[in-house]
Amino acid sequence: MASGHNFSNYSLIIGRFQPIHKGHMEVIKKCAAESDHITIGIGSAQYSHERNNPFTAGERYLMIDESLREEGISNYFIVPIEDLNRYSLWVYQVKTMSPPFSKVYSNNPLTRRLFSEAGYAVKDSPLYNRELYSGTAVREKMAADGDWRGLVPSAAARIIDEISGAERLKEISGTD
Ligand code: ATP
Ligand code: MG
């Protein structure tokens, strides 16, 4: 008896989500609507407490999970994935950490190349207001006491405040 799964419309979105921002949310919403199921891969999962990677995989997991719930999205899994630093094996690393998927949404040229060489369908994902919505822009505003809260989903802003994320970023950006 065949099972009910047809993975041909299962998709993967991968990013570092340091932190998740409204640009990510637009892609996730589009992908969740077009796909039966999405896996959100949290890349560079082993890093935290660095200027460019301030949040742990667990904190990022919570921010993504609560932001998606807040949007009413429910057809997803979230999977933290550590870097391998060997690109030829990375696709297989992702594959073994994720539920099955057939399509990959990414704008990153290396990610696109690696997954298409491995036989996956790579989908374009439009960039939404990239000037405003990038992880780098959010972290820069946090470090400068700017208005970062408007750039991220409200659930993510709440969690960052709960863990004193902006204070962490400012401290670890300082010099001794
Ligand atoms: P950073 O500045 O920290 O690199 P980032 O904004 O580039 O952060 P990542 O966590 O590196 O985000 O995730 C990269 C993925 O997120 C890519 O596939 C990219 O297409 C998507 N992405 C990033 N910003 C946007 C945006 N404004 N609109 C749509 N997709 C985005
Ligand atoms: Mg990036």
Image (cartoon, rainbow, N blue to C red):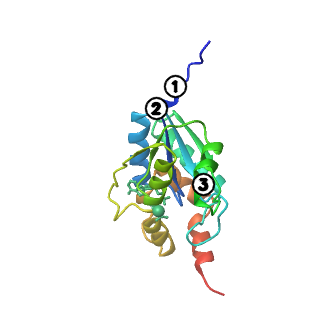
From what the image shows, is residue 101 above or below residue 14? above
Would you name the residue on which mark 3 appears? Answer: 90
Could you give the CA–CA distance between mark 1 and mark 3, rounded to whole angstroms?
Answer: 24 Å
Could you give the CA–CA distance between mark 2 and mark 3, rounded to whole angstroms?
Answer: 22 Å
- Classify 10 Å Cα crowding around label 2: few (below 14), some (14-19), many (20 and above): some
Q: Return the residue nearer the eye: 47 or 99.
A: 99
Rendering quarter of residue 170: bottom right
Would you name the residue on which mark 1 appears? Answer: 6
- Classify 10 Å Cα crowding around label 3: few (below 14), some (14-19), many (20 and above): some
Which dot, 2 or 3, sits closer to the camera?
A: 3
**Label 2 SS:** helix
Residue pictured at 67% horizontal, 60% vertical: 46
Would you name the residue on which mark 2 appears? Answer: 9
The kind of residue on which mark 1 rests is Asn
Residue pictured at 61% horizontal, 60% vertical: 44
Position of the N terminus by quadrant: top right
The spot of residue 129 in percent (x, y) is 32, 58
The kind of residue on which mark 2 rests is Asn
User: Does the closest atom of ligand 1 sit within 8 Å of the Cβ of label 2?
Assistant: no
Whether residue 80 appears in this view of the structure is no
The spot of residue 118 in percent (x, y) is 52, 47
Q: What's the mark number on residue 95?
A: none
Q: Are marks 1 and 2 in contact (CB under 8 Å)?
A: yes
- Classify 10 Å Cα crowding around label 1: few (below 14), some (14-19), many (20 and above): few
Would you say 67 lies left or right of 49 here? left
Position of the C terminus by quadrant: bottom right
The spot of residue 139 in percent (x, y) is 49, 68
Q: Earlier in the sequence, mark 1 or mark 3?
A: 1
Q: Return the residue nearer the eye: 87 or 139.
A: 87
**Label 1 SS:** loop
Quadrant location, ligand no. 1: bottom left
